[in-house]
Amino acid sequence: MTPVPFQKSSEHIAHFFGNVTHDVAVVLGSGLGGFTRHIGDKEILRTSDIPDYPRSTVAGHSGELVSAAVGKKRILVFSGRSHYYETASTLNASVTAIVSHALGIPRIVLTNAAGILNESFYPGDLMVIKDQINLTFRNVLSEIGSPVQSLHPVYSPELAKLAFAAAEDCSVNLKSGVYVGLTGPSYETPAEVRAFQKLGGDAVGMSTVHEALYARASGLEVLGISCLTNYSTGITSQPLSHEEVTEIGNRVDERFTRLITRFVDLL
Ligand code: HPA
């Protein structure tokens, strides 16, 4: 039997929050951490206080778990995540999904910052992930002895529909597209960006794909939302920086919060 990953972490988290039931987990990508400022009735657990929990060292990721009430629902927010490029572990990169499953949370919203591949999109746009291309050439499910299986559709069409209904209710413009997941940590070259456009990608980033696979394989419903922070390398002549990515994330904060809050209401 493969041991359950992060069992000690999950037990600590469940106990800290009084074994309360959460309706949905929300993972906040780079620059989107401001969401937790806008929610009330919250309890905060620092990831550094959780046994065996992987740390995120990335700017824009605060490293907290927040249990909060949103309307009549209770949500568990992961403010920050561990990326594959930090520890070269797909399990660490999937800890949010692994813990959510262990806590019995039935659905997960995976958000991220991503570069634009689809040139009809703009920096600051929000995009529902309709599908993914896993270009990390790794799969977290091989770490837990998973059988060969179809996970199509990885992202729940029902949750995507709810996200569009929420967007309409709160007048947020929401795009839909395919997310290309890479290991990073270097940004793409212009030649790679042209290749990913030809493959059918609309946005590119360094997270999410393993969390989505693990969550879906464990029976959670998955919603993915990318905050498009920049044109990918070569689409414009501007050089790309992590500061620019978190800056745009901070600017969409208010719109993002309205969208997620309404989405949770509609669940
Ligand atoms: N490429 C990869 N990851 C990203 C980007 C990008 O352009 N922007 C934000 N995350």
Image (cartoon, helix red, strand yellow):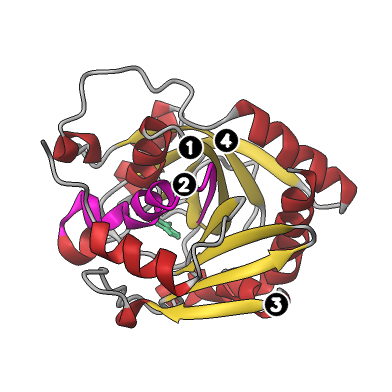
Q: Which residues are magenta?
A: 88-111
Residue 18, relative to residue 100: is it above or below?
below
Asked whether residue 91 is drawn in magenta, I would say: yes
Q: Quadrant of the N terminus?
A: top left
Evaluate if marks 2 and 3 touch, with contact meaning CB atoms under 8 Å apart. Answer: no
Q: Quadrant of the C terminus?
A: top right
- Residue 183, labelled with which disc? none
User: Percent from the top left, x then y, of residue 226?
Assistant: 55, 51
For mark 3, what is the residue? 41
Amino acid residing under circle 2: Gly
- Residue 104, labelled with which disc? 2
10 and 258: which is toward the camera: 10
- Residue 177, labelled with which disc? 4
Q: Nearer the viewer, mark 3 or mark 4?
A: 3
Q: Quadrant of ligand 1?
A: bottom left
Instruction: Count residues near mark 4 (Cα–Cα under 10 Å), then give few for <14, some for 14-19, many for 20+.
Output: some
Q: CA distance from mark 4 to mark 2?
A: 29 Å
Q: Nearer the viewer, mark 4 or mark 2?
A: 2
Q: Left or right: 250 with respect to 82?
A: right
**N-terminal-most mark, 4 or 2:** 2
Amino acid residing under circle 3: Asp
